[in-house]
Amino acid sequence: MSQTSQHLIREGDTALIENAQHRMFFSADGSLTDFQERFRLRDQDMWLLSSLRFSSRKFSEFVYQNEERGKAMRLELSSEEYWRVTSSQSDRSKLANLIQAVPGLSTEEAIRCLSVKAGQF
């Protein structure tokens, strides 16, 4: 997993990009032309990438690419899965604060509590 495509290039070595048989793109970073060239993407793949949608806490669309083709797919998380993997600093703080405020509350119990609360809105 990488935060930006530049993280995959080490001292000019692009082997991680060139040897990957499967790729998942949630967005393009930097110059679109550079991104397309870096990953050797077709115009159709770039069109798919530009059409991706995202809905916070609900779903993220991404382009899955193998050696044969690319296609748009959707990743949907349950409320519990969201709380388990979120990188939102605000939400991570809510989880930590709940665990600290309720002695003996496990992380899993806190996640269930926050998931139920989130599902009500």
Image (cartoon, grey):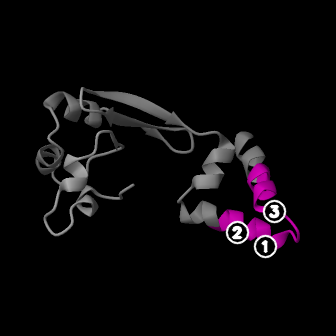
Q: Which residues are magenta?
A: 93-113
Q: Kindly identify the amino acid type of the residue bearing the numbered disc 1.
A: Gln
Q: Quick one: quadrant of the N terminus? A: bottom left
Residue at the (69%, 46%) spot, across then down: 80
Q: Specify the amino acid type for callout 2.
A: Ala
Query: Helix, strand, or loop for circle 1?
Result: helix
Work out whether residue 80 or residue 17 is closer to the camera in this orientation and state it: 17
Q: Residues within 10 Å of mark 2 (few under 14, many from 20)?
A: few
Quadrant position of the C terminus in the picture: top right
From the image, state whether disc 3 or disc 1 is nearer to you. Answer: 3
Q: Quadrant of residue 102?
A: bottom right
Q: CA distance from mark 2 to mark 3?
A: 11 Å
Our reading of the magenta stretch's main secondary structure is helix
* Disc assigned to residue 106: 3
Q: How many marks?
A: 3
- Is 64 left, or right, of 16 in this rendering? right
- Residue at mark 3 to residue at mark 1: CA–CA distance: 10 Å
Q: In the rendered image of this protein, does residue 33 appear above or below residue 48?
A: below
Which residue corresponds to the image point at 64% horizontal and 39% vertical from the top-left?
A: 78
Q: Which residue is mark 1?
A: 100
Q: Is residue 68 left or right of residue 109?
A: left
Residue identified by numbered label 2: 96
Marked residue nearer the N-terminal end (2 or 3): 2
Residue 52 seen: no
Q: Amino acid at mark 3?
A: Ser
* Number of other residues with Cα within 10 Å of mark 1, as a class: few under 14, some 14 to 19, many 20 or more: few
Could you tell me if the residues under marks 3 and 1 are in contact, i.e. CB atoms within 8 Å?
no
